[in-house]
Image (cartoon, rainbow, N blue to C red):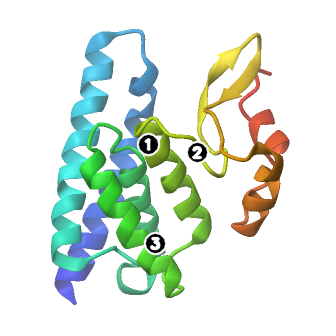
Amino acid sequence: MAAVAAVAEELTAMAAADHRATHRANSDDPAEQLAWRRLTARHADRLGEIMDAHGWPTADRFGADAARAAWLIAQHADRQLDVQRRALRLMEQAVSTGAADPRDLAFLRDRTLVNEGREQIHGTQIAGVRDGAPVPWPCEDPEHLDERRAEVGIPPFAEYVARFAPA
């Protein structure tokens, strides 16, 4: 049990470091961008080791904060698709047994699909802002997007992208 508690603490510390450094991801300074890439790579490598030892870090075993931290680390493993894909598979299994959140799975699935150059399913990934309006990555079957989003507890697309619009 002490090992699980130590891993939970490590995951939450990595997520805190991620939050503190997120501004570096889109910095104009190449050194800041590199620091972000190195941080997310270290975290993804460690998440891979944790998944080797424990499977997907679920809330019932590791606590809600650690489970959310594992998800965040997987989300940001953009340059390590092997880790992201593996996290996705393990999280799918956890969701199927009720041990993980379908909403988080939808975000991770979309992120992984976008990183693979494929259309996303739930419209959670924004490519950027053009003429003051958020531009999503392409979505499959856009006519039924809000239905799929509702199924996993994500607000309608228009409401979601309004959060990204400049004030």
Mark 1 burial class by Cα count in 10 Å: few <14, some 14-19, many 20+: few
Q: CA distance from mark 1 to mark 3?
A: 25 Å
- Reply above or below: 84 against 114: below
Q: Is residue 42 above or below residue 38?
A: below
Tell me which amino acid carries mark 1: His
Q: Which kind of residue does numbered mark 3 sit on?
A: Glu
What element does badge 3 sit on?
Answer: helix
Position of residue 96 relative to residue 9, above or below, is below
- Kind of residue indicated by mark 2: Gln
**Residue, x 46% and y 64% (percent of image)?**
68
Mark 1 and mark 3 residues within 8 Å of each other at the beta carbon: no
Residue tagged by mark 1? 19
Q: Nearer the viewer, residue 31 or 100?
A: 100
Residue at image position (26%, 43%) is 80
**Which residue is the site of mark 3?**
92
Q: Rounded to the nearest whole Å, what is the CA distance between mark 2 and mark 3?
A: 16 Å
Give the residue number, with chain letter if any, for mark 2. Answer: 120
Q: Is residue 58 left or right of residue 11?
A: right
